[in-house]
Image (cartoon, helix red, strand yellow):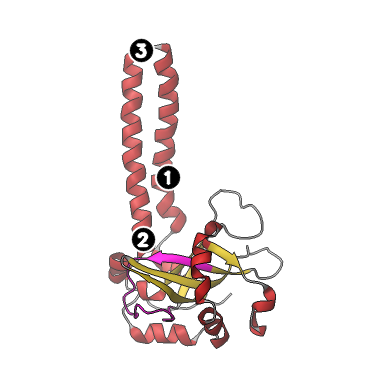
């Protein structure tokens, strides 16, 4: 597994890293829902009817679940330094440009640690901004892959959630980004450049990733 070490600029990451922003939005939504469901539970109990008690139990469970998500989400993701330190360094390129942002196309090994061999896939992620890079198709965007499952117990031999997180979201230093680009094999960059046209297909695929036929991989990755 290829990793890349650099000093994370926390101020910059908090301002531009969309992974952090996504977790923050999820946490706030969960807190709001927990408060609403908690209030609804109290109202139902105050009605003092058999049916209201039944409903109050359902609402209370929903409130507890939402509160758990609010607590669990930041812990599940971990600190931004940990994400960059533990995430594998992967190649990603700008594949599509839109009025509201960009689409990144990345090449990621989505196989679980105990899987038999690598399982490479094209992965997409829609982003709103990409400081430190040109918003042009083919722009090289070195990233780390953030890997997770939607369930506590993994199913199958691949990760369910795979999201490339640009190095540029963790530093303003152009030399660091250039060093990350150089740390990735040219064959991987070329494979992405040759497959920009599959971006839309990948974006519409389940979990936003599409497995690469091993025969299409460069020899270095087989």
191 with respect to 84 (left or right):
right
52 with respect to 152 (left or right):
left
In this rendering, the answer to whether 105 lies above or below 176 is above
Residue 48 — which label?
Answer: 3
Residue at screen point 33% across, 14% down: 47
Magenta range is 123-141
Image position, residue 160 (x, y; %): 56, 57
Q: Quadrant of residue 75?
A: bottom left
Instruction: Compute the Cα span from label 3 to label 1.
Output: 30 Å
Q: Residue furthest right?
A: 116
In this rendering, the answer to whether 114 lies above or below 136 is above
Which image quadrant: the N terminus? bottom right
Judge whether residue 24 is colored magenta: no
Residue at screen point 29% across, 71% down: 12
Q: Earlier in the sequence, mark 2 or mark 1?
A: 2
Badge 2 marks a residue whose secondary structure is helix
Residue 136 — which label?
Answer: none
Judge whether residue 126 is colored magenta: yes
In this rendering, the answer to whether 61 lies above or below 56 is below
| Residue 92 seen in this snapshot | yes
Image position, residue 8 (x, y; %): 36, 73
Q: Please, what is the dominant secondary structure of the magenta stretch?
A: loop
Residue 69 — which label?
Answer: 1
Image position, residue 159 (x, y; %): 58, 59
């Amino acid at each position: 597994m290829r990793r890349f070490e650099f000093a994370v600029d926390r101020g910059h990451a908090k301002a531009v890293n969309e992974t952090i922003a996504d977790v923050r939005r999820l946490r706030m939504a969960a807190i709001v829902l927990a408060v609403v469901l908690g209030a609804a539970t109290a109202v139902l109990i105050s009605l003092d009817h058999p049916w209201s008690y039944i409903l109050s139990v359902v609402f209370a469970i929903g409130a507890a679940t939402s509160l758990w998500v609010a607590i669990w989400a930041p812990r599940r993701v971990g600190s931004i330094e940990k994400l960059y330190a533990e995430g594998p360094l992967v190649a990603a390129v700008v594949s599509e440009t839109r009025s509201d942002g960009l689409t990144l196309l990345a090449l990621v090994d989505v196989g679980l640690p105990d899987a038999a061999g690598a399982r490479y896939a094209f992965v997409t992620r829609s982003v709103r901004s990409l400081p430190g890079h040109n918003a042009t198709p083919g722009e090289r965007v070195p990233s780390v892959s953030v890997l997770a499952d939607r369930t506590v117990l993994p199913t199958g031999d691949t990760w369910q959630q795979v999201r490339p997180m640009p190095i540029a979201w963790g530093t303003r230093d152009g030399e660091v980004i250039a060093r990350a680009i150089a740390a990735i094999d040219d064959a991987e960059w070329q494979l992405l450049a040759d497959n920009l046209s599959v971006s839309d297909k990948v974006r519409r695929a389940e979990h936003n990733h599409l497995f690469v036929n091993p025969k299409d991989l460069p020899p270095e990755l087989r």
